[in-house]
Image: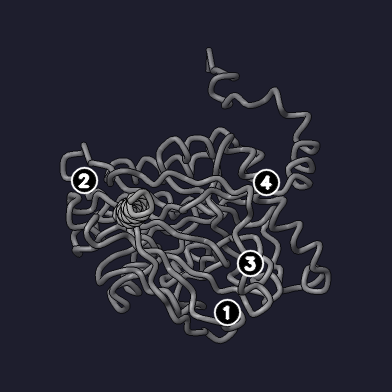
Protein backbone atom coordinates (compact mmCIF):
# COMPACT_ATOMS: atom_id res chain seq x y z
CA UNK A 1 0.00 0.00 0.00
CA UNK A 2 2.79 2.43 0.87
CA UNK A 3 4.37 1.81 -2.55
CA UNK A 4 1.07 2.59 -4.31
CA UNK A 5 0.76 5.90 -2.44
CA UNK A 6 4.30 6.89 -3.44
CA UNK A 7 3.59 6.13 -7.12
CA UNK A 8 0.34 8.12 -7.09
CA UNK A 9 2.04 11.10 -5.43
CA UNK A 10 4.81 11.07 -8.06
CA UNK A 11 2.28 11.00 -10.91
CA UNK A 12 0.35 13.94 -9.42
CA UNK A 13 3.59 15.95 -9.05
CA UNK A 14 4.60 15.29 -12.66
CA UNK A 15 1.15 16.32 -13.89
CA UNK A 16 1.22 19.61 -12.00
CA UNK A 17 4.72 20.38 -13.30
CA UNK A 18 3.66 19.76 -16.90
CA UNK A 19 0.60 21.96 -16.45
CA UNK A 20 2.79 24.75 -14.99
CA UNK A 21 5.27 24.62 -17.88
CA UNK A 22 2.47 24.75 -20.48
CA UNK A 23 0.82 27.71 -18.75
CA UNK A 24 4.12 29.57 -18.49
CA UNK A 25 4.81 29.03 -22.20
CA UNK A 26 1.36 30.34 -23.15
CA UNK A 27 1.79 33.38 -20.92
CA UNK A 28 5.24 34.09 -22.36
CA UNK A 29 4.02 33.91 -25.98
CA UNK A 30 0.94 36.00 -25.32
CA UNK A 31 3.05 38.74 -23.77
CA UNK A 32 5.34 39.21 -26.78
CA UNK A 33 4.82 42.52 -28.62
CA UNK A 34 5.67 40.94 -31.97
CA UNK A 35 6.11 37.67 -33.83
CA UNK A 36 8.98 36.38 -35.92
CA UNK A 37 8.25 35.97 -39.60
CA UNK A 38 10.63 34.26 -42.03
CA UNK A 39 11.61 36.77 -44.70
CA UNK A 40 13.50 35.87 -47.86
CA UNK A 41 15.64 38.80 -48.90
CA UNK A 42 16.10 39.75 -52.54
CA UNK A 43 19.26 41.48 -53.69
CA UNK A 44 19.64 44.77 -55.46
CA UNK A 45 22.66 45.09 -57.73
CA UNK A 46 25.46 46.73 -55.77
CA UNK A 47 23.60 46.67 -52.45
CA UNK A 48 25.72 43.98 -50.83
CA UNK A 49 25.98 40.19 -50.65
CA UNK A 50 22.91 38.00 -50.65
CA UNK A 51 21.94 36.73 -47.18
CA UNK A 52 23.06 33.19 -46.50
CA UNK A 53 19.56 32.26 -45.35
CA UNK A 54 16.15 33.87 -44.83
CA UNK A 55 16.26 36.41 -42.05
CA UNK A 56 13.80 36.53 -39.18
CA UNK A 57 11.97 39.83 -39.26
CA UNK A 58 10.10 41.03 -36.16
CA UNK A 59 6.84 42.71 -36.99
CA UNK A 60 4.22 44.22 -34.74
CA UNK A 61 1.67 41.61 -33.65
CA UNK A 62 -1.59 41.87 -35.56
CA UNK A 63 -3.75 41.47 -32.47
CA UNK A 64 -1.88 44.31 -30.75
CA UNK A 65 -2.48 46.57 -33.73
CA UNK A 66 -6.17 45.67 -33.81
CA UNK A 67 -6.56 46.51 -30.14
CA UNK A 68 -4.71 49.83 -30.35
CA UNK A 69 -6.04 53.14 -31.69
CA UNK A 70 -5.34 53.70 -35.37
CA UNK A 71 -1.77 54.91 -35.93
CA UNK A 72 -0.84 54.64 -32.26
CA UNK A 73 1.83 51.94 -32.64
CA UNK A 74 5.02 52.18 -34.68
CA UNK A 75 5.23 49.80 -37.64
CA UNK A 76 8.44 47.76 -37.55
CA UNK A 77 10.70 47.48 -40.56
CA UNK A 78 13.61 45.13 -40.00
CA UNK A 79 16.35 43.36 -41.90
CA UNK A 80 19.48 41.31 -41.56
CA UNK A 81 21.44 41.57 -44.80
CA UNK A 82 24.77 40.30 -43.55
CA UNK A 83 26.70 38.08 -45.95
CA UNK A 84 27.69 34.45 -45.30
CA UNK A 85 30.51 35.34 -42.89
CA UNK A 86 28.07 37.34 -40.78
CA UNK A 87 25.05 35.03 -40.91
CA UNK A 88 25.30 34.22 -37.22
CA UNK A 89 26.48 37.64 -36.09
CA UNK A 90 24.55 39.33 -33.31
CA UNK A 91 23.94 43.03 -32.73
CA UNK A 92 26.56 44.76 -30.55
CA UNK A 93 26.11 43.49 -27.00
CA UNK A 94 26.43 47.00 -25.60
CA UNK A 95 23.56 48.39 -27.65
CA UNK A 96 20.81 49.56 -25.27
CA UNK A 97 17.18 49.15 -26.21
CA UNK A 98 15.24 52.20 -27.30
CA UNK A 99 11.68 52.51 -26.08
CA UNK A 100 9.43 53.10 -29.11
CA UNK A 101 6.93 55.92 -28.84
CA UNK A 102 3.72 54.73 -27.20
CA UNK A 103 1.58 56.75 -29.56
CA UNK A 104 1.75 58.89 -32.66
CA UNK A 105 2.13 62.55 -31.64
CA UNK A 106 -1.12 64.48 -31.69
CA UNK A 107 -1.41 67.72 -33.64
CA UNK A 108 -2.51 70.82 -31.77
CA UNK A 109 -2.19 73.12 -34.79
CA UNK A 110 -5.52 74.01 -36.44
CA UNK A 111 -5.41 72.56 -39.93
CA UNK A 112 -2.00 70.95 -39.38
CA UNK A 113 -1.16 67.82 -41.37
CA UNK A 114 0.11 65.71 -38.51
CA UNK A 115 1.84 62.38 -38.99
CA UNK A 116 0.01 59.45 -40.52
CA UNK A 117 2.38 56.78 -39.15
CA UNK A 118 5.52 56.20 -37.13
CA UNK A 119 7.70 53.32 -38.35
CA UNK A 120 10.43 51.66 -36.32
CA UNK A 121 13.58 50.60 -38.18
CA UNK A 122 15.57 47.59 -36.99
CA UNK A 123 19.08 48.40 -38.23
CA UNK A 124 20.55 44.96 -37.49
CA UNK A 125 22.70 43.90 -40.44
CA UNK A 126 22.75 47.34 -42.03
CA UNK A 127 19.55 47.46 -44.13
CA UNK A 128 19.36 49.86 -47.07
CA UNK A 129 16.39 52.07 -47.93
CA UNK A 130 15.53 54.27 -50.90
CA UNK A 131 14.69 52.80 -54.30
CA UNK A 132 17.33 54.80 -56.13
CA UNK A 133 19.81 52.22 -54.84
CA UNK A 134 18.01 49.68 -52.63
CA UNK A 135 14.98 47.80 -53.97
CA UNK A 136 14.36 45.45 -51.08
CA UNK A 137 12.30 47.34 -48.53
CA UNK A 138 9.19 49.09 -49.78
CA UNK A 139 7.50 50.08 -46.51
CA UNK A 140 5.60 53.15 -47.72
CA UNK A 141 2.00 53.01 -48.83
CA UNK A 142 0.62 54.96 -51.74
CA UNK A 143 0.76 58.74 -51.16
CA UNK A 144 3.11 58.38 -48.16
CA UNK A 145 6.38 60.29 -47.92
CA UNK A 146 9.34 60.48 -45.55
CA UNK A 147 11.00 63.89 -45.20
CA UNK A 148 14.80 63.81 -44.88
CA UNK A 149 17.39 66.58 -44.74
CA UNK A 150 21.17 66.47 -45.26
CA UNK A 151 24.21 68.63 -44.48
CA UNK A 152 22.95 70.44 -41.38
CA UNK A 153 22.80 71.73 -38.83
CA UNK A 154 23.11 75.25 -40.16
CA UNK A 155 22.19 78.64 -38.66
CA UNK A 156 18.94 80.22 -39.85
CA UNK A 157 18.20 77.49 -42.39
CA UNK A 158 17.75 74.52 -40.04
CA UNK A 159 15.66 76.52 -37.53
CA UNK A 160 13.47 77.75 -40.42
CA UNK A 161 12.89 74.14 -41.52
CA UNK A 162 12.03 73.20 -37.93
CA UNK A 163 9.48 76.02 -37.71
CA UNK A 164 7.78 74.94 -40.94
CA UNK A 165 7.58 71.33 -39.75
CA UNK A 166 6.26 72.38 -36.34
CA UNK A 167 3.53 74.48 -37.96
CA UNK A 168 2.23 71.29 -39.59
CA UNK A 169 2.97 68.94 -36.64
CA UNK A 170 5.41 66.94 -38.77
CA UNK A 171 8.63 65.06 -38.00
CA UNK A 172 11.61 64.43 -40.25
CA UNK A 173 15.01 62.72 -40.29
CA UNK A 174 18.14 64.87 -40.32
CA UNK A 175 21.46 63.44 -41.55
CA UNK A 176 23.99 65.79 -39.98
CA UNK A 177 27.61 66.44 -40.92
CA UNK A 178 29.89 65.92 -37.92
CA UNK A 179 31.80 69.17 -38.32
CA UNK A 180 28.60 71.18 -38.66
CA UNK A 181 27.16 69.55 -35.54
CA UNK A 182 30.27 70.44 -33.53
CA UNK A 183 30.10 74.04 -34.79
CA UNK A 184 26.39 74.35 -33.95
CA UNK A 185 25.50 71.88 -31.19
CA UNK A 186 22.69 74.12 -29.97
CA UNK A 187 20.89 73.55 -33.29
CA UNK A 188 21.38 69.79 -33.10
CA UNK A 189 19.87 69.85 -29.62
CA UNK A 190 16.96 71.91 -30.97
CA UNK A 191 16.32 69.26 -33.64
CA UNK A 192 16.36 66.51 -31.00
CA UNK A 193 14.15 68.48 -28.61
CA UNK A 194 11.55 68.93 -31.35
CA UNK A 195 11.20 65.14 -31.64
CA UNK A 196 12.94 64.62 -34.96
CA UNK A 197 15.26 61.73 -35.78
CA UNK A 198 18.95 62.54 -36.15
CA UNK A 199 21.42 60.38 -38.07
CA UNK A 200 24.87 61.10 -39.50
CA UNK A 201 26.40 62.08 -42.85
CA UNK A 202 30.17 61.60 -42.30
CA UNK A 203 32.58 63.95 -40.55
CA UNK A 204 33.25 66.38 -43.41
CA UNK A 205 31.11 65.28 -46.37
CA UNK A 206 33.84 63.43 -48.25
CA UNK A 207 32.97 61.18 -51.19
CA UNK A 208 34.05 57.79 -49.86
CA UNK A 209 34.03 56.25 -53.35
CA UNK A 210 36.97 58.46 -54.37
CA UNK A 211 40.61 58.49 -53.31
CA UNK A 212 42.12 58.72 -50.79
CA UNK A 213 39.15 57.05 -49.10
CA UNK A 214 38.53 54.44 -51.80
CA UNK A 215 42.05 53.03 -51.34
CA UNK A 216 42.29 53.62 -47.60
CA UNK A 217 39.43 51.84 -45.88
CA UNK A 218 40.55 52.81 -42.39
CA UNK A 219 40.42 56.46 -43.38
CA UNK A 220 36.94 55.95 -44.83
CA UNK A 221 35.79 54.25 -41.61
CA UNK A 222 37.16 57.18 -39.63
CA UNK A 223 35.15 59.60 -41.76
CA UNK A 224 32.00 57.64 -40.96
CA UNK A 225 32.57 57.00 -37.25
CA UNK A 226 34.14 60.32 -36.41
CA UNK A 227 31.10 62.00 -37.91
CA UNK A 228 28.74 59.79 -35.91
CA UNK A 229 30.62 60.51 -32.67
CA UNK A 230 30.53 64.25 -33.39
CA UNK A 231 26.77 64.28 -33.97
CA UNK A 232 26.27 62.16 -30.86
CA UNK A 233 28.36 64.60 -28.82
CA UNK A 234 26.50 67.61 -30.20
CA UNK A 235 23.14 65.97 -29.49
CA UNK A 236 24.11 65.33 -25.89
CA UNK A 237 22.32 61.99 -26.00
CA UNK A 238 21.21 59.12 -28.23
CA UNK A 239 21.01 59.46 -32.01
CA UNK A 240 19.80 56.99 -34.61
CA UNK A 241 22.04 54.41 -36.31
CA UNK A 242 20.96 55.95 -39.63
CA UNK A 243 23.55 56.99 -42.22
CA UNK A 244 23.51 58.59 -45.66
CA UNK A 245 26.57 58.57 -47.93
CA UNK A 246 27.66 61.94 -49.36
CA UNK A 247 26.72 62.25 -53.04
CA UNK A 248 24.86 58.93 -52.61
CA UNK A 249 28.05 57.03 -53.40
CA UNK A 250 27.98 53.58 -51.79
CA UNK A 251 31.37 51.75 -51.78
CA UNK A 252 30.63 48.03 -51.25
CA UNK A 253 33.31 47.75 -48.54
CA UNK A 254 31.70 50.56 -46.58
CA UNK A 255 28.24 49.02 -46.92
CA UNK A 256 29.71 45.84 -45.41
CA UNK A 257 31.27 47.88 -42.63
CA UNK A 258 27.96 49.58 -41.81
CA UNK A 259 26.34 46.14 -41.75
CA UNK A 260 28.89 45.03 -39.15
CA UNK A 261 28.18 48.19 -37.13
CA UNK A 262 24.41 47.69 -37.30
CA UNK A 263 23.85 51.00 -39.08
CA UNK A 264 21.15 51.44 -41.74
CA UNK A 265 21.96 53.18 -45.03
CA UNK A 266 19.51 55.61 -46.60
CA UNK A 267 19.42 56.57 -50.24
CA UNK A 268 16.33 58.27 -51.67
CA UNK A 269 13.26 57.87 -53.87
CA UNK A 270 12.76 61.56 -54.63
CA UNK A 271 15.97 63.58 -54.98
CA UNK A 272 15.10 67.27 -54.90
CA UNK A 273 18.47 68.37 -56.32
CA UNK A 274 17.86 71.49 -54.26
CA UNK A 275 21.60 72.15 -54.06
CA UNK A 276 21.41 73.06 -57.75
CA UNK A 277 18.26 75.15 -57.40
CA UNK A 278 18.48 78.62 -55.93
CA UNK A 279 14.82 79.62 -55.83
CA UNK A 280 12.21 78.21 -53.44
CA UNK A 281 9.58 77.72 -56.15
CA UNK A 282 12.06 75.69 -58.21
CA UNK A 283 12.69 73.41 -55.22
CA UNK A 284 8.96 72.90 -54.72
CA UNK A 285 8.39 72.19 -58.42
CA UNK A 286 11.25 69.69 -58.54
CA UNK A 287 9.90 67.67 -55.61
CA UNK A 288 6.21 67.77 -56.53
CA UNK A 289 6.81 66.85 -60.19
CA UNK A 290 8.84 63.78 -59.23
CA UNK A 291 6.45 62.84 -56.45
CA UNK A 292 3.38 63.03 -58.70
CA UNK A 293 5.11 60.63 -61.08
CA UNK A 294 6.26 58.17 -58.42
CA UNK A 295 3.34 58.51 -55.99
CA UNK A 296 5.32 58.07 -52.76
CA UNK A 297 8.83 57.93 -51.40
CA UNK A 298 11.72 59.10 -49.24
CA UNK A 299 12.41 62.73 -50.17
CA UNK A 300 16.00 64.01 -50.00
CA UNK A 301 16.46 67.72 -49.23
CA UNK A 302 19.18 69.85 -47.60
CA UNK A 303 18.56 72.05 -44.58
CA UNK A 304 21.94 73.57 -45.42
CA UNK A 305 20.29 75.29 -48.41
CA UNK A 306 18.48 78.59 -47.83
CA UNK A 307 16.18 78.04 -50.82
CA UNK A 308 15.00 74.77 -49.26
CA UNK A 309 14.32 76.38 -45.91
CA UNK A 310 12.28 79.10 -47.64
CA UNK A 311 10.44 76.50 -49.75
CA UNK A 312 9.22 74.39 -46.85
CA UNK A 313 5.93 76.14 -45.99
CA UNK A 314 4.73 76.00 -49.60
CA UNK A 315 5.98 72.45 -50.11
CA UNK A 316 4.11 71.22 -47.04
CA UNK A 317 0.99 73.09 -48.14
CA UNK A 318 1.07 71.35 -51.52
CA UNK A 319 1.73 67.96 -49.97
CA UNK A 320 -1.35 68.39 -47.83
CA UNK A 321 -3.45 69.66 -50.72
CA UNK A 322 -2.34 66.70 -52.83
CA UNK A 323 -3.45 64.20 -50.21
CA UNK A 324 0.05 63.08 -49.28
CA UNK A 325 0.77 61.67 -45.83
CA UNK A 326 4.00 62.01 -43.84
CA UNK A 327 5.63 59.02 -42.13
CA UNK A 328 8.25 59.41 -39.40
CA UNK A 329 11.12 56.93 -39.00
CA UNK A 330 12.56 56.05 -35.59
CA UNK A 331 15.26 53.48 -34.71
CA UNK A 332 14.58 50.35 -32.74
CA UNK A 333 17.80 51.00 -30.78
CA UNK A 334 20.14 53.99 -30.64
CA UNK A 335 23.58 54.22 -32.23
CA UNK A 336 26.50 52.85 -30.25
CA UNK A 337 29.53 55.03 -31.03
CA UNK A 338 33.14 53.87 -30.86
CA UNK A 339 35.27 55.13 -27.97
CA UNK A 340 38.33 55.95 -30.08
CA UNK A 341 36.32 58.37 -32.23
CA UNK A 342 34.49 59.81 -29.24
CA UNK A 343 37.91 60.64 -27.77
CA UNK A 344 39.10 62.08 -31.06
CA UNK A 345 36.13 64.43 -31.26
CA UNK A 346 36.37 65.39 -27.60
CA UNK A 347 40.05 66.30 -27.93
CA UNK A 348 39.36 68.40 -31.01
CA UNK A 349 36.48 70.17 -29.31
CA UNK A 350 38.24 70.71 -25.96
CA UNK A 351 38.70 74.43 -26.63
CA UNK A 352 34.97 74.96 -27.16
CA UNK A 353 33.55 73.01 -24.22
CA UNK A 354 32.67 76.29 -22.50
CA UNK A 355 31.00 77.64 -25.64
CA UNK A 356 27.84 75.56 -25.53
CA UNK A 357 25.44 78.50 -25.18
CA UNK A 358 23.76 79.83 -28.33
CA UNK A 359 25.09 83.11 -29.71
CA UNK A 360 21.82 84.88 -28.93
CA UNK A 361 22.33 84.25 -25.21
CA UNK A 362 25.95 85.45 -25.24
CA UNK A 363 25.86 88.44 -27.59
CA UNK A 364 23.03 91.00 -27.54
CA UNK A 365 22.64 94.15 -29.59
CA UNK A 366 21.97 97.07 -27.27
CA UNK A 367 22.28 99.88 -29.80
CA UNK A 368 22.37 100.32 -33.56
User: Percent from the top left, x then y, of residue 137?
Assistant: 42, 74
Q: Disc 3 on helix, strand or loop?
A: loop
Left or right, 109 with reference to 315: left
Q: Residues within 10 Å of mark 3 (few under 14, many from 20)?
A: some
- Image position of 212 with respect to 195: above or below: below
Tell which tag, 2 or 4, sits nearer the viewer: 4
Considering every residue shown, the one lying at the far bottom of the view is 45
Disc 4 to disc 3, C-alpha distance: 23 Å
Q: Is residue 8 visible?
A: yes
Mark 1 vs mark 3: give the one in front.
Answer: 3
Q: In the rendered image, is residue 315 in sight?
A: no
The x, y position of residue 281, in whole percent, is 35, 60
The span from disc 1 to disc 3 (Cα, nearest Å) is: 19 Å
The label on residue 47 is: 1
For label 2, the residue is: 112
Left or right placement of residue 27 versus residue 109 in this view: right
Relative to residue 86, is residue 29 drawn left or right?
A: left
Q: Name the front one of labels 1 and 2.
A: 1
Do the CB atoms of the residues marked 4 and 3 lie less than 8 Å apart? no
Residue at 78% in and 40% down: 343
According to the image, label 4 marks what residue?
A: 229
For marks 3 and 2 on the same chain, the one whose residue lies earlier in the sequence: 3
Q: Nearer the viewer, residue 133 or 316?
A: 133
Residue for badge 3: 89
Q: Earlier in the sequence, mark 2 or mark 4?
A: 2
Q: Secondary structure at mark 2?
A: loop
The label nearer to you, 4 versus 3, is 3
| Residue occupying the point 53% across, 50% down | 240
Residue shown at 40%/66% (left/top)? 298
Other-residue count near label 2 (Cα within 10 Å), few / some / many at <14 / 14–19 / ≥20: some
The disc, 1 or 3, on the residue closer to the chain's N-terminal end is 1
Amino acid sequence: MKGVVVVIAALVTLGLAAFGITAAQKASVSSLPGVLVAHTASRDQGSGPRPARPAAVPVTDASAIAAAPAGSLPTRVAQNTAGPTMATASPPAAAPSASPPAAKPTCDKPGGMGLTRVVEIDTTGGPGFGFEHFKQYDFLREKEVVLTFDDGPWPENTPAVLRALADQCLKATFFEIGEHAIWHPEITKEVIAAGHTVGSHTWSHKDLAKNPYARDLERAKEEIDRGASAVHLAAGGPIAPFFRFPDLQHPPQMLSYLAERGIATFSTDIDSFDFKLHKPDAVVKSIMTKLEKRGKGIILMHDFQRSTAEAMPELLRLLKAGGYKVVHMVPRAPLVTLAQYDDMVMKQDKLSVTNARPTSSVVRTISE
